[in-house]
Image (cartoon, helix red, strand yellow):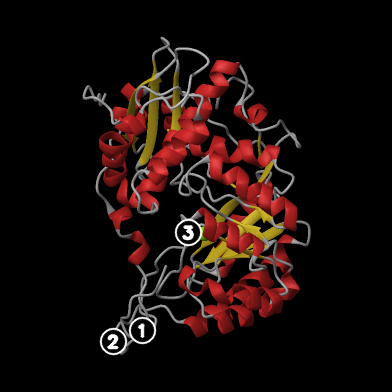
C-alpha cells in the first residue's frame, strides 16, 4: 500500500469539519487480466476496520500509467480526508493537476470516484443505485456482440445470441482479406498488387454492411434489435451514405460513424441520417460529451463511465440527456472491470434517459476474482441489492493472473488502407 507520511500541503487537508472521524488511509491499484485485457481496480481503504471501496480504472492500452497515477499522484491528495466528500475529492483530483485530464488521469479518478461511492453505500447500508435516487426501472436491457468472418457466419452467431435470450445484438462482419473492427482478420489478400494487399477499403465496407443487415433481417426476422459499430472510419458524407443504405433494416443504433476529430459535423450527419446515431466512447472530456448531448449530434450518448471520471460526472450527463431527449448507452465491453459494469448499471436503473447497456459476458474465473459480479439473465443486467456495488475482489486470485504488456497496447492501430496508410480506429 502506498502511504505518504510526509506533511500534506494545506490545500489537501480536510477543508471543513467532517461528521465523524472516518478517514481515507490508503489508495492503491490492483491489476488483473483473467481473460486477456488488463483490468485496473482502485481500492480505497479507510480508518474503519473492514471498510474499503472498489472502483474501475481500466485503461487496458496504458494500464501501467494509470497504476502510477493512482499510487504516486492520487493517493497523497486524498489520504487523511473524509471519504464522504466525494464531490470535493474528485474535483480536487481533477483540478490539482491543472492540465485537464486525459484518459490516464480520468481512469485513475474514476477508480477513486467509484471506490468512494462504494464506501458511501457500505456506510449507509444501501446499494449505490439507492444513493443515486433509487430505481426508475427494475433492470437494464443489454446488447451483446456478435461477429462473423462472412455474412452467413455473422448471422448464425447473432441467432445464437437471440436463442440465449438477447433482444439486442450488435453485428460486425469481416471485410474479405482485411477484417474490420470487432470481426476477425481474414487470411488472403484484399487486392493483390496493392502496396498493402490486406488493406481495408471503404467502398467495399459501404457495400458489405447493408448486405449484412439485409441478410440479418431476412433470417433473424423483425423482432430483434440490430446494432452496428463503424468504429470511426468514415467521413461525414460516407456516414450519411451508410446510414441511408441501412434505413430499410431499422437499426437500433449506428455507432461511431465519425472519428472524434470530425465530431463538429455530427449534427448535420444526424439530421440526414434515418438511423439513430450513438457516439461518445472516445472522449474522456465530460464537457465534450455534454456538448454532444446538447448540440444535436447524437441520439444515444456512449461515454465510458470509467474514462470520463466515474459516476459523479456520468450522472450529470445522464441528467442532461434526460432533459433533451437523448438516451444513454454506456460503453462497457471486455475492457471494463465488473466494478465498472456495476457503476454503469447503477446509472442505467436510476436514469429515465436510459437507452441500452453494452454487455460483456465475464468468464467463470473473473466471477471468482470479483465475487458478486453481475451476470446477464436473458439479456437483463440487474444491480446487486447489497451495500455499495455488492462486488468484492479476491486479491490473491487476482495476483495469480497478472497482465502482460501485450497486443492490447497497439490493437487500435491495426487497420491500414490498400496504400498502407494507417486508419483511425
Ligand atoms: Mg464502439
Secondary structure, mark 3, is loop
Instruction: Indicate which disc residue 418 carries.
Output: 1
- Residue at which label 3 appears: 283
Pick the residue in front: 47 or 237.
47
- Occupied quadrant, residue 250: bottom right
Q: Single out the residue that lies furthest toward the top.
A: 49
Q: CA distance from mark 3 to mark 1?
A: 28 Å
Query: Closer to the observer: label 3 or label 1?
Result: 3
- Residue at which label 2 appears: 195
Q: Residues within 10 Å of mark 1 (few under 14, many from 20)?
A: many
- Occupied quadrant, residue 389: top right
> x, y (%) of residue 13?
36, 26
> x, y (%) of residue 306?
47, 44
**Residue at 58% across / 78% down in the picture?**
239
**Residue at 51% across / 24% down in the picture?**
84
Tell whether label 1 touches label 2 (CB within 8 Å): yes
Amino acid at each position: 500500500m502506498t502511504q505518504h507520511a510526509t506533511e500534506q500541503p494545506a490545500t489537501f487537508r480536510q477543508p471543513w469539519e467532517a461528521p465523524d472521524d472516518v478517514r481515507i488511509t490508503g489508495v492503491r491499484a490492483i491489476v488483473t487480466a483473467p481473460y486477456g485485457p488488463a483490468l485496473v481496480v482502485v481500492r480505497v481503504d479507510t480508518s474503519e476496520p473492514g471498510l474499503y471501496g472498489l472502483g474501475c480504472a481500466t485503461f487496458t492500452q496504458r494500464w501501467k500509467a494509470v497504476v502510477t497515477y493512482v499510487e504516486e499522484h492520487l493517493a497523497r491528495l486524498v489520504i487523511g480526508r473524509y471519504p464522504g466528500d466525494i464531490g470535493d475529492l474528485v474535483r480536487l483530483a481533477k483540478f490539482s493537476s491543472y492540465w485537464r485530464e486525459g484518459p490516464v488521469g480520468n481512469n485513475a479518478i474514476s477508480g477513486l470516484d467509484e471506490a468512494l461511492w462504494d464506501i458511501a453505500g457500505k456506510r449507509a447500508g444501501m446499494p449505490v443505485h439507492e444513493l443515486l435516487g433509487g430505481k426508475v426501472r427494475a433492470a437494464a436491457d443489454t446488447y451483446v456482440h456478435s461477429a462473423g468472418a462472412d455474412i452467413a457466419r455473422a448471422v448464425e452467431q447473432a441467432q445464437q445470441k437471440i436463442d440465449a435470450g438477447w433482444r439486442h445484438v450488435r453485428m460486425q462482419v469481416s471485410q474479405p482479406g482485411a477484417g474490420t473492427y470487432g470481426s476477425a482478420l481474414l487470411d488472403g489478400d484484399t487486392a493483390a498488387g496493392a502496396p498493402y494487399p490486406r488493406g481495408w477499403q471503404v467502398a467495399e465496407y459501404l457495400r458489405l454492411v447493408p448486405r449484412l443487415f439485409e441478410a440479418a433481417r431476412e433470417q433473424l426476422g423483425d423482432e430483434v434489435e440490430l446494432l452496428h459499430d463503424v468504429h470511426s472510419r468514415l467521413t461525414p458524407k460516407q456516414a450519411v451514405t451508410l446510414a441511408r443504405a441501412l434505413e430499410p433494416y431499422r437499426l437500433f443504433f449506428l455507432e461511431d460513424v465519425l472519428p472524434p476529430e470530425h465530431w463538429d459535423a455530427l449534427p448535420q450527419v444526424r439530421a440526414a441520417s434515418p438511423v439513430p446515431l450513438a457516439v461518445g466512447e472516445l472522449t474522456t472530456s465530460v464537457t465534450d460529451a455534454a456538448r454532444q448531448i446538447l448540440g444535436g449530434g447524437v441520439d444515444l450518448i456512449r461515454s465510458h463511465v470509467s474514462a470520463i471520471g466515474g459516476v459523479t460526472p456520468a450522472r450529470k450527463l445522464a441528467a442532461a440527456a434526460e432533459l433533451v431527449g437523448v438516451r444513454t448507452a454506456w460503453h462497457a465491453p471486455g475492457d471494463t472491470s465488473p466494478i465498472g459494469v456495476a457503476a454503469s448499471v447503477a446509472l442505467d436503473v436510476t436514469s429515465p434517459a436510459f437507452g441500452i447497456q453494452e454487455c460483456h459476458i465475464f468468464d467463470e474465473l473473473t466471477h471468482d476474482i470479483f465475487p458478486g459480479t453481475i451476470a446477464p439473465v436473458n439479456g437483463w443486467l440487474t444491480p446487486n441489492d447489497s451495500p455499495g456495488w455488492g462486488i468484492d475482489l479476491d486479491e490473491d486470485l487476482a495476483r495469480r493472473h497478472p497482465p502482460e504488456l501485450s497486443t492490447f497496447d497497439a490493437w487500435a492501430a491495426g487497420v491500414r488502407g490498400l496504400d498502407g496508410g494507417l486508419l483511425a480506429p
